[in-house]
């Protein structure tokens, strides 16, 4: 189970969002966005912390007004996670949060106003070493592009992006990343593929307005999975009508599945059937809930019978194979402990935590030796 991803990533230039590298050979970073009222500082800080604790590398906060910009000043003082300010229409808001220590500005130059206003934002970003994200969205294309193409299309998204890139080229500013998002998978994927072959700036991936937790996860997994398999993408947000923490969890599951990043427990579990010797679904639900705090990468197999159980258990850090009268737990590929159903979850949790602590100690010792 321990092998490198065969995906060859697109070569992109690297920018820094706070202390997180985006692009180049940096790991693909995971983002989410707060949905609290930004002026409610306590609620926003609490949600940013929850998102970061779930594994987000970067968190975006909407700054729709000067009052929100002032609230951001107080949020910034309490948060060490890199923060992106989402800004539309009023360039003065961008200038204000730049003063207050934002790590990245998300703007659409097309709705910021004339060239002088865009220049003011770029000059401020340059002076303070703040990168910018150009956010292109199918739902807010320029009116002339809507008229030209009749409807949002991949070519329309790319043309809109190059308009904004031309602004930044004119100002000799290259510290930016780009997103081209649509709610349609095919449009999004084609747009990203088109622009990926024409520029080397980092790309922020997302299927916008993907839907609720289940449907949005499926749609995002298909669209982002296609792009990630192509090696396209330097940072991503899974956009769900759900708790932002769930966006982060889904993002991690995507990257783990493609062997692009590892964090926490990678469970290999059977779907359960009449051969199972214990309740696989109940066991998995309990283990996932109990072990969310573990961040060290681990592979754990939970298989209900002896058909595939031993084979899977031999390839992971810890594996469970259902059996009669006892279930068998493998440790590092070797049979280790027999356990009956009533003690099953408690014993698995204990052994997983012990293994995780051992791996953390080994990792710490390796760092000290280096």
Image (cartoon, grey):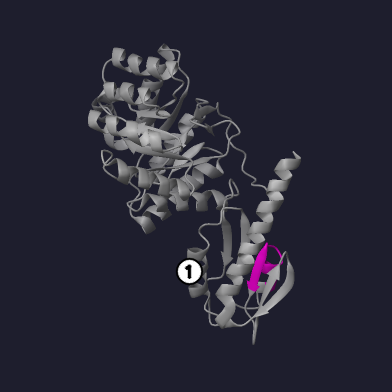
Q: Residue furthest bottom?
A: 325
The structure residue drawn at horizontal position 37% and vertical position 53%, both measured from the top left corner, is 216
Front residue (pair 230, 290) = 290
Asked if residue 55 lies left or right of residue 211, the reply is right
Front residue (pair 156, 180) = 180
Q: Is residue 37 above or below residue 289?
A: above
Front residue (pair 28, 130) = 130
Judging by the rendered image, the residue that carries numbered circle 1 is 285
Quadrant position of residue 188 = top left
The structure residue drawn at horizontal position 54% and vertical position 40%, both measured from the top left corner, is 28
The structure residue drawn at horizontal position 66% and vertical position 65%, both measured from the top left corner, is 318
Asked if residue 215 lies left or right of residue 54, the reply is left
Quarter of the image for the N terminus: give it: bottom right
Q: Picture coordinates of residue 121 (x, y %)?
A: 35, 18
**Residue 316 on the magenta segment:** yes
**Residue 54 on the magenta segment:** no
Q: Picture coordinates of residue 220 (x, y %)?
A: 42, 49
Q: Picture coordinates of residue 74 (x, y %)?
A: 33, 34
Q: Is residue 168 above or below residue 179?
A: above
Q: What's the magenta region?
A: 310-320
Asked if residue 83 lies left or right of residue 232, the reply is left
Q: Is residue 204 above or below residue 261?
A: above
Quarter of the image for the C terminus: give it: top right
Quadrant position of residue 96 = top left
Residue 344: in sight, yes or no?
Answer: yes
The structure residue drawn at horizontal position 33% and vertical position 43%, both measured from the top left corner, is 44
Number of residues whose C-alpha sits closer than 10 Å to that of mark 1, classed few (under 14), some (14–19) or many (20 or more): few
Asked if residue 130 lies left or right of residue 291, the reply is left
Q: Picture coordinates of residue 192 (x, y %)?
A: 45, 35
Residue 1: in sight, yes or no?
Answer: no
Q: Secondary structure at mark 1?
A: helix
């Amino acid at each position: 189970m321990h092998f490198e991803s065969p995906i060859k990533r697109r070569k992109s230039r690297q920018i820094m969002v706070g202390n997180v590298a985006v692009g180049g050979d940096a790991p693909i970073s995971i983002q989410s966005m707060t949905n609290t009222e930004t002026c409610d500082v306590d609620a926003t800080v609490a949600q940013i912390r929850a998102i970061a604790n779930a594994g987000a590398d970067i968190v975006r906060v909407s700054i729709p007004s000067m009052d929100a910009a002032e609230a951001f000043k107080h949020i910034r003082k309490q948060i060490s996670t890199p923060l992106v300010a989402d800004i539309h229409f009023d360039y003065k808001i961008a200038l204000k949060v730049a003063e207050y220590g934002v790590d990245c500005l998300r703007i659409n130059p097309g709705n910021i106003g004339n060239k002088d206003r865009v220049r003011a934002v770029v000059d401020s970003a340059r002076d303070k070493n703040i990168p910018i994200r150009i956010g292109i969205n199918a739902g807010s294309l320029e009116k002339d592009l809507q008229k030209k193409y009749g409807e949002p299309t991949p070519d329309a998204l790319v043309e809109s992006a190059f308009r904004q890139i031309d602004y930044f080229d004119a100002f000799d500013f290259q510290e930016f990343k780009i997103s081209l998002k649509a709610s349609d998978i095919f449009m999004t994927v084609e747009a990203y593929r088109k622009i990926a072959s024409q520029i080397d700036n980092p790309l922020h991936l997302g299927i916008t307005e993907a839907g609720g937790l289940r449907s949005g996860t499926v749609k995002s997994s298909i669209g982002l999975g296609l792009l990630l398999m192509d090696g396209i993408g330097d940072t991503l947000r899974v956009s769900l009508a759900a708790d932002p923490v769930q966006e982060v969890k889904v993002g991690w599951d995507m990257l783990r599945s493609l062997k692009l990043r590892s964090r926490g427990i990678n469970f290999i579990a059977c779907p359960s059937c009449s051969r199972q010797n214990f309740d696989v679904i109940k066991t998995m639900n309990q283990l996932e809930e109990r072990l969310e705090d573990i961040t060290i990468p681990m592979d754990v197999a939970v298989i209900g019978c002896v058909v595939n159980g031993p084979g899977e258990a031999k390839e992971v850090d810890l594996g469970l194979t259902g059996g009669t009268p006892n279930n068998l737990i493998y440790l590092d590929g070797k049979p280790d402990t027999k356990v009956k159903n009533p003690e099953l979850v408690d014993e698995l949790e204990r052994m997983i935590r012990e293994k995780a602590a051992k791996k953390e100690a080994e990792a710490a010792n390796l760092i000290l030796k280096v």
